[in-house]
Amino acid sequence: MIGAAQGLYTMNMHRSAISRLLFAVLFACLLPGLAMAQEASQSKPEASEALVSLQATITDLQATIADLSPRVGNSEGLQRQVAESRLGKARMALLQRNLEFARTVEGLDEETAGYAEFRQRAIAKLQQQTALTRRIVDDIRGRMKLPEAGASAADQAAAYSRIFELLASLDEVYRIYIEGLDVSRRFGIDVSSLDAEVRQDLAERAATGSALLDISASDMTALRASLAAVPDSTEIKAKLAVVTNNVSRLAASLGKVLGLMQSLDMDTSQYRQQLITVTGQISSDFFDVGVLSALLVGWGKTLWNGLIESGPGLVFKLILFFVLVYFFYKLAGFAQRLTERAFDNAQKQVSQLLRRMVLMVVRNAIIVIGVLIALAQIGISLGPLLAGLGVVGFIVGFALQETLSNFASGMMILIYRPFDVDDYVEAAGISGLVSNMSLVNTTILTFDNQTIVVPNNKIWGDVIRNVTAQKTRRVDLVFGISYDDDIPKAEKILQEIVAAQDAVLDDPAPNIRLHELGDSSVNFIVRPWVKTEDYWETYWSIMRTVKLRFDEEGITIPYPQRDVHLHQA
């Protein structure tokens, strides 16, 4: 009995688990559908509530408009301006809310409760948009007032600021109206006549903006000419600032209108060309085929007319310019040759660096003067050019401080002439023959045929040894003999060897003396004088001859020796 009861209990437990599993699977399958149904049931009331809320807002705006309209006609001065501003804002808000209501209805499902009624209301509101838009446009145009011709710059700035605010509102009205026409088409409303009217309005709006932009651009040109004649006039500067700002804002406003026109597939190439011409800003519109072709045609006509009007004078100026430049170029060559001849005939020899620098300065100075005179003859003002060169020179000088330091060192080398080209020098840790010199660096050719360019700042800041600066040079030699050798004999041999050298000078006389009793040898100094160019040949010749004669005469050149004494304990 107990075993049967346990089996029955186990079977019931399995059945309960299977039932729970089936219920969970069924619930999981039904859950998305239940959620979608719940979402749909919630979205419909939410959309209906939004439409009811919009309708209430629209009703309040209509009441506000009905209350403000008679106040505008019955008030004056500041009260009238305040009432007009509030009325315009209320109408603009009503225009936006009507469009929002229609868009919300457009997004409803046809099965939504009250859909037919909401649709009829949306169509009615869309049909009311035309009249409301017309009132707003007429109101904005009526509030636009240009400043008087003799108004001050401050009054003009204030008046144009109000105008640009109204223009921005007008562009926004047209944008909302065009979007409303698109929604109306989707509701099945025939708006072909309204579309034609808005196209005409936008064309007139673009034409008016284009004319105002041209007038402002002309005023800006005139004010700039006036400012050039009277540069200290504060009023002209202020008016020019106002007009410049007007041109920028008019161009931006016209650009917005052209964007609305393009949304209706209207041709705007003419106005795009004007924007690029007036503002000088190249945008993506520049690459439009129509705009680009119109600009090229206009530029071509301007260039052709300019060539016809001023072509002969321009050609004459160009010919005069090149003639003057050529004349001064030849004059610079002639002056350079005269300077070279003067250096050649000078009794005092000058350094190669000074010679090249003077020749370069003379030639280039004459050419620069000639170019400046030629530029002045063709009508180019030299004042701003020279001022610009001064600023550029300051910037370049600040950036090239190290180079200018080398230049200053080059000038010091030029003045004091510690060495010249073809001199053998030791400077900045480098030994060699000077092959080239400039005011910035010096080129040294080492004896193993390496070309080393050393900045003049390094050379002038170090010890300079000019080996070839003097015409004569002493050859310093030291020879050692053994303590056992005959000193007079060795001295006589050294005198004979030196006397046999053709390059050795008689004056100063050679100096041969017993100089030192060294640790291992008795040392003689041999110091003959030779010309600087004969130094190394004489050095090598005496050195070789002494070794050979000492060997022949049995005179020993000893090695270093050291005596070691051992003491036995």
Image (cartoon, rainbow, N blue to C red):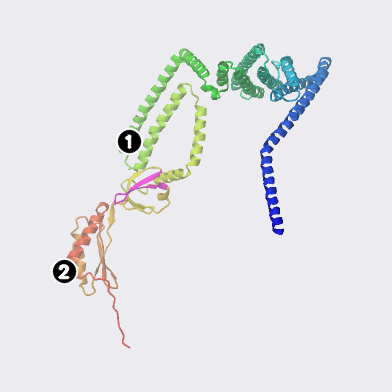
For disc 1, the marked residue is 340
Q: In the depicted view, which residue is nearer to us: 343 or 364?
A: 364
Tell me the tag on residue 251. Answer: none
Q: Position of residue 94 (x, y in %)?
A: 75, 21
Structural crowding at the residue carrying mark 2, measured as other residues with C-alpha within 10 Å and reported as few (<14), some (14–19) or many (≥20)? few
Compared to residue 529, the image places residue 201 above or below, namely: above
Foreground mark, 1 or 2, reads: 2
What residue is shown at x 32% (from left), y 32% (from top)? 337
Relative horizontal placement of residue 512, taking residue 178 as reference (left or right):
left
What residue span does the magenta drawing correspond to?
A: 440-456
The amino acid on which the numbered mark 2 sits, given as a three-letter code, is Glu
Visible in this render: residue 222? no
Please indicate whether residue 183 sits to the left or right of residue 561 in the image: right
Residue 543 is situated, as x and y percent measured from the top left of the image, at: 22, 61
Residue placed under numbered mark 2 in the picture: 553
- Report the label total: 2
Under mark 1, the amino acid is: Glu
Q: Is residue 463 left or right of residue 136?
A: left
- Give the residue drawn at x 69%, y 34%: 36
Judge whether residue 465 is colored magenta: no
